[in-house]
Image (cartoon, grey):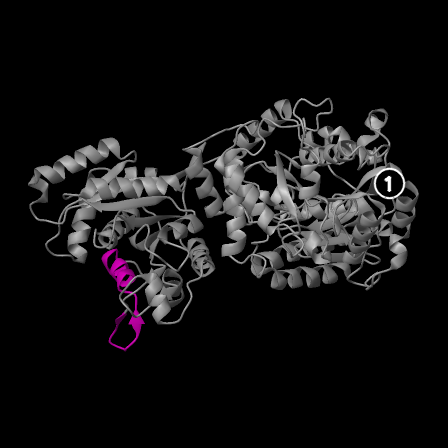
Amino acid sequence: MIGELNKGIFITGTGTGVGKTLCSSILLRLLRAEGIDVVPMKPIQTGSEIDAAGNHFAPDLDFHLRMAEIEASAEELKLMNPYLFKPACSPHLAAEIEQRTIEFSGITEAFDELSTRRKFVVVEGAGGVFVPIDSKNTMMDLMLELELPVVVVANSQLGTINHTLLTLEALKSRGINVSGLILTDHDSNASDDFIANDNTELLSKIAGVPLLMRVPFLSEISVQSISDVSTNFQKRGFGKSLVSSLTANKLIDSNLAQLRKIDHQHLWHAFTDINRFENSEDYTVIERSKGSYLIDVNGNKHLDGISSWWCANLGHGNKKIISALQSRSREIQQCILGDLSHSDAIYLAEELAAILPGDLNHVFFASDGSSAVEASLKIALQYWWNRDVQGKKRFIYLANSYHGDTLGAISVGFIESFHASLTDFVWPNYPVKSPLTTDLYTGNGKDWDAESFAPMEKLLVERASEVAAVIVEPLCQAAGGMRIYSPDYLKRLRKLCSELGVLLIADEIAVGFGRTGTMFACQQADVVPDIMVLGKGMTSGAFPMSATVVTTEIYNSFRNADPFAEKNRTFFHGHTFSGHPLAAACARAAIKVFKDEKILELLPEKSAILSEGFVQLAKLIPGSSSNALGMIGMLKVPAESGGAKFAAAAATIARSLGLFIRPLGDVLYLYPPLTTSAVELKRMIDILGEGIKRSLSNPGKV
């Protein structure tokens, strides 16, 4: 590990008037004395003042610049204070009065630009950690957004222990790194005050963070008095200890190489060629994630173009989901659902039933998609057994389907290139030609083609007596190459299954929870399946969870009229972590986020950006085709342009430019978090386009 100075630090307080502005100025002088090119930032200033020319300015920022004797250009001054309000009140109220909106993106962009111009930025917040910025966010949320370590300022007088410890506990509970604590004296006699001295000693022992300094009371605040305090601290070595406390530990290349070495020795990666991976020198190692980004061990940010295998629908680190996980984990960790129940699973089942279409009212929980699919197949088979219907032991599935990797799931999604070694171990079912797909660029297949359904109709009519269920991925065959097809196909399938007495299983593991533009893909066809399988986006990736949901009719068929009857209809199937309390808490929080933050209502604009982007991408490669649905965009590279080899080359370049994607054979696609901003989405499309262009200009490497 090596030490490298962070880009900045966030100064907060236990409340208003504790001395944040004074301490920030002292810190600025101390850092400057250590030779660091540092500047202040006051992201949100309320109570602006007027200069001699009649212009409004930020008094706290002006104070910092004068006290620390820092010169800044007019352009830098704007970056240091992106939001200035006239009313002297909390930020949310000031913004409301002036009918303005405080956007975090405006603050982060200003900080990023400022940090490229200067070595270090001291950011001063407003009031305490829970001061509201708007109806949803507080100062603590801004700290999380800026991803800076925090220094807490508190006074040394009576009452400070409670306020200080509560503030520190709140910051730690949100995973915020607290670099230290500064105490301030607010009375000329504080240095002799036994209470203030005892508070200082006690907090240094129990606060759990370093006590950086105790700032004496200043009867007069001036450049000279602050300079004297700073010089005194400097002589006592506080400057160097301050720099040390603000130093980030970052992995350097040698450590990254060591991580990769250990990786190769012990970690087995899913769907990954071992030799190719071990010989790769460009794969990254992720340390954390946030929003639409994966952040590697060196702090580099990578746009997550595939929602980390299609599950982070609400982005990484959603604060409401994380809060639910943290708070619930202190109360319960595990509880089985065999002859026992718990409130998290009960309420989640109710909330899922409320948002699912039709009478899909009974939820069987599992841990991953394959397990939920496996349960759905067993439920379908046993349903007919429960009803004493003979012969229904087969399934129909679409060619190019992927429903998971357990043996049952493979039996309804056999892919030769994946599963050739298991040919003798799966039971025979009936694949049928996939529906026609549409092409945004050329318009081919735009209208519903009845002939597309003919193969399914023929097979169903012929085999209905032996088919337990048809299983499909509604509207989009994801792993099969993001094959997007018409809702009319699904409507016709539902109708025919009902007429012939065949169950319909909708595998919404990849396409559920807003991915296609509606909460569930089936809703776009106004279809209610007999069984729906859910997963991936249920918790937005915060915890493994999946579910198999059935209609009341199917559920009731598993009842025993007599518990001691010879034919036992109980569903003898389960998982250790079925309905895990923490997973359920995360899933409940995710459903609430969809409602509270109007996730679905905000999708049309982003979907339009994605659609138009893939039309333009298709123009780059002759003979290619593209499509989009909700927050799915795909581009198929024709064989004459290099097919899968070209897609792999373009993806490799895109990854080097900060976009993590993983092609499906000859298909390049984006599957970003639903919360991805319009700016981030356009950036993803631009990077993907650049990967394509560079691959086209370097055909020898494709």
Question: Residue drawn 76% across and 29% down?
Answer: 407
Quadrant in the picture for the N terminus: top left
Residue at 72% x, 44% y: name it: 530
Q: Is residue 464 above or below residue 561?
A: below
Q: Nearer the viewer, residue 452 or 469?
A: 469
Q: Which residue is mark 1?
A: 431
Q: Which residues are magenta?
A: 49-69
Q: Quadrant of residue 182?
A: top left
Q: Which quadrant is the C terminus positioned in?
A: top right
Compared with 30, 250 (above or below) is above
Of 500 and 439, nearer the camera is 500
Q: Tell me if 551 is positioned left or right of 221 in this view.
A: right
Where in the figure is residue 419, as x and y percent of width and height? 81, 31
Answer whether residue 308 is visible to the viewer in this image: no
Res 405 seen here: yes
Query: Amino acid type of disc 1?
Result: Pro
Residue 95, x across and y down, in percent: 36, 67
